[in-house]
């Protein structure tokens, strides 16, 4: 059986950042990739998707965007090319087209089963992604057969959906983006919004994610956060990366003619039943956004940052009496789009490190002896899952790995 | 931070939260009420026992609630109407939430008052119009809160209280209800 010091599972930005720091320390390793480099960016994203972070924040260790549009947002294909370019510059030892089917504890480290045969490794870095599977609520089985159901993994473009009404479930980045582009084809769209994170695209003349970086919000460490479980479960902010740099929240969707309803609570007897708590989730999102903007203003004042004056945005407009139920058998809705989140897939991980909800237990990416993770939400910092957010995490995780060897 | 006292033992609640994370079976509670018809539309509902923390529990004393309908419904008005009990539940649950969240956030409360109004089109329950639902069309809760906090912090308090409220959830989300004859 072949042996390496370290096996990295996944050649996305997280796995490749790990590889870069392993190489810097001359730790012999391989990066195993089921498909090609940045596979999910190439194969598991819808056509119009762009990165949420502006190009100026597109950077990986020693590698950065140097194109002509620092305020623009990369398409999924451009992200994949950017990551592949990083792999090349970093000369990462990537083996593509290798499925890792099992990781088990061995006598000295771990034993991996792969489609190219067994592999032994003293340590393993799990960098296989945070979004391998769409999450769909169990009551999706109650949706009548006459309604087409899609997840963001099946969805490519709005014109591939049947004509007629669409119910988009979930108001994170995915939900608002898909609701907007489907609505722009003229289809009637209803958006079921639960708890969500509202953000303007730009604030006081610069990208809101630039504010988060500059004011230090993104660097907040996992061991400084009160409710880490909650922070790790937070839905992605209502943002879209588009050339127009427009804000895309519930107010903008209402103006487009999207009907906003409460969280989809159940499907019963062919009826979709929505929560009557829409006003509360909207006001929670408004309050949290304003608190964040206050943070930016305070930072700008204390750091002497030159920027246009503070802005405030209109509260979320909630319909006076939001619809509480919708007949899914009546023909009004032809498609349900489940934008209800994603989860990592660990079916191949035969080490007892998952909690009762199937989530990886880890302390800042340290899973257990010789076992590490990267690229999960708030792994070590609020910015962990963003492209540029992995660098500091990877440096620290690989330092821990090296010290333990 | 100054010490605030709203009379809520938040530490005990947070300790319970931590303890129950590792013991989901202990977190399973069943609340019970038994009701007896008196006469007309008058009934008496009693509450004393409940199940929780893995065993039967008792309130200190039995609580008795009379429910009837008002004279404008041609009833004797021996108690509030059943749907008014929902308003009692909602107001008291949200108020408890406000106090608990305020304690946890270090906000000293001086007074908390609320009025709850439920709009009800009674054509539904009378069967006069099948398009009208039986329950409330909408409910409005208005809080007046005097506290050592900014207006925004008070709004956040109320919003968080709704987020954690059992009765708010039970009213806003569908619940499976089985009614059978023993």
Image (cartoon, coloured by chain):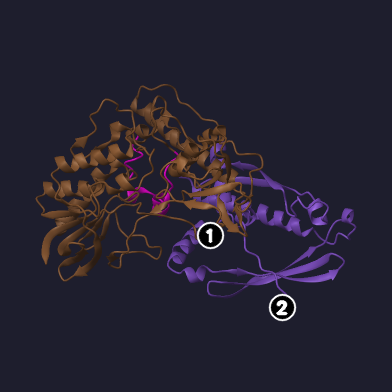
Chain colours: A brown, B purple
Is residue B4 something that shows in the picture? no
Q: Quadrant of the N terminus of chain A?
A: bottom left
- Secondary structure under the numbered disc 2 in the rendered image: loop
Q: Circle 1 is placed at which residue position?
A: A139
Lateral position of residue A38 relative to residue A264, left or right: left
Q: Circle 2 is placed at which residue position?
A: B182
Q: Where is residue A137 in the image (x, y as percent from the top left)?
A: 49, 57
Lateral position of residue B76 relative to residue B180, left or right: right
Residue A350 located within the stretch drawn in magenta:
no
Q: Position of residue B49 (x, y in %)?
A: 65, 73
The residue drawn where x is 67% and y is 52% is B91
- Dot 1 alpha-carbon crowd within 10 angstroms: few under 14, some 14 to 19, many 20 or more: few
The subunit carrying tag 1 is A
Q: Where is residue A329 in the image (x, y as percent from the top left)?
A: 62, 53
Lateral position of residue A364 relative to residue B49, left or right: left
* Magenta region, main secondary structure: loop
Q: Position of residue B182 (x, y in %)?
A: 71, 78
The residue drawn where x is 24% and y is 39% is A81
Distance from disc 2 to disc 1, alpha carbons, whole Å, reads 30 Å
- Dot 2 alpha-carbon crowd within 10 angstroms: few under 14, some 14 to 19, many 20 or more: few
Query: In the image, which residues are magenta?
Result: A215-238
Q: In which quarter of the image is the C terminus of chain A?
A: bottom left
The subunit carrying tag 2 is B
Name, please, the residue furthest toward the bottom: B182
């Amino acid at each position: 059986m072949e042996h390496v010091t370290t096996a990295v599972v996944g050649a996305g930005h997280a796995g490749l950042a790990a590889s870069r720091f392993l190489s810097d320390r001359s730790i012999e390793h391989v990066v195993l990739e089921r498909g090609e480099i940045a596979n999910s960016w190439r194969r598991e994203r819808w056509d119009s998707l762009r990165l949420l972070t502006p190009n100026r924040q597109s950077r990986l260790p020693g590698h950065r965007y140097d194109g002509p549009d620092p305020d623009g947002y990369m398409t999924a294909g451009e992200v994949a090319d950017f990551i592949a370019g990083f792999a090349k510059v970093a000369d990462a030892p990537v083996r593509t087209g290798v499925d890792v089917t099992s990781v088990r504890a061995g006598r000295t480290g771990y034993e991996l089963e792969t489609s190219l045969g067994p592999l032994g490794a003293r340590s393993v870095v799990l960098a296989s992604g945070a979004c391998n599977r769409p999450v769909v609520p169990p009551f999706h089985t109650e949706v009548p057969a006459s309604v087409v159901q899609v997840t963001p993994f099946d969805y490519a473009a709005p014109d591939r959906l049947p004509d007629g009404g669409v119910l988009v479930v979930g108001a994170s980045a995915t939900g608002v983006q898909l609701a907007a582009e489907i609505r722009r084809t003229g289809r009637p769209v209803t958006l079921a919004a639960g708890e969500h994170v509202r953000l303007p695209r730009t604030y006081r003349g610069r990208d809101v994610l630039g504010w988060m970086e500059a004011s230090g919000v993104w660097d907040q460490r996992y061991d400084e956060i009160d409710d880490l479980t909650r922070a790790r479960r937070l839905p992605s902010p209502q943002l879209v990366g588009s050339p127009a740099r427009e804000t895309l929240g519930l107010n903008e969707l209402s103006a487009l003619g999207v009907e906003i309803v409460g969280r989809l609570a159940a499907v019963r007897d062919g009826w979709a039943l929505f929560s009557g708590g829409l006003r509360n989730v909207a006001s929670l999102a408004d309050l949290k956004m304003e608190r964040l903007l206050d943070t930016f203003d305070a930072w700008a004042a204390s750091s002497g940052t030159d920027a246009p004056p503070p802005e405030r945005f209109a509260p979320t407009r909630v319909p006076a009496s939001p619809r509480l139920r919708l007949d899914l058998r009546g023909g009004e809705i032809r498609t349900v789009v489940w934008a209800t989140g994603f989860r990592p897939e660990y079916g191949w991980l035969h080490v007892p490190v998952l909690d009762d909800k199937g989530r990886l237990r880890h302390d800042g990416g340290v899973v257990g002896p010789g076992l590490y993770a990267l690229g999960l939400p708030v792994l070590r910092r609020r910015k962990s899952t963003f492209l540029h957010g992995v660098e500091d995490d990877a440096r620290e995780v690989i330092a821990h790995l090296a010290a333990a060897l | 931070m100054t010490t605030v006292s709203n009379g809520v033992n938040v530490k005990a609640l947070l300790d319970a939260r931590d303890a129950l994370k590792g013991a989901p079976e202990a977190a399973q509670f069943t609340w019970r009420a038994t009701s007896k018809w008196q006469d007309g539309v008058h009934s008496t509902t009693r509450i004393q026992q409940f199940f929780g923390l893995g065993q039967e529990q008792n309130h200190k004393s039995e609580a008795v609630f009379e429910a009837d309908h008002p004279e404008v419904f041609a009833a004797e008005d021996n108690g509030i109407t059943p749907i008014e009990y929902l308003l009692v539940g909602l107001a008291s649950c949200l108020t408890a939430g406000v106090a608990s969240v305020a304690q946890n956030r270090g906000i000293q409360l001086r007074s908390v008052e609320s009025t709850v109004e439920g709009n009800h089109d009674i054509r539904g329950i009378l069967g006069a119009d099948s398009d009208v639902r039986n329950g409330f069309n909408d409910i409005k809760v208005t809080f007046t809160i005097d506290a050592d906090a900014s207006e925004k912090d008070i709004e956040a308090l109320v919003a968080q209280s709704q987020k954690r409220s059992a009765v708010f959830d039970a009213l806003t989300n569908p619940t499976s209800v089985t009614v059978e004859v023993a």
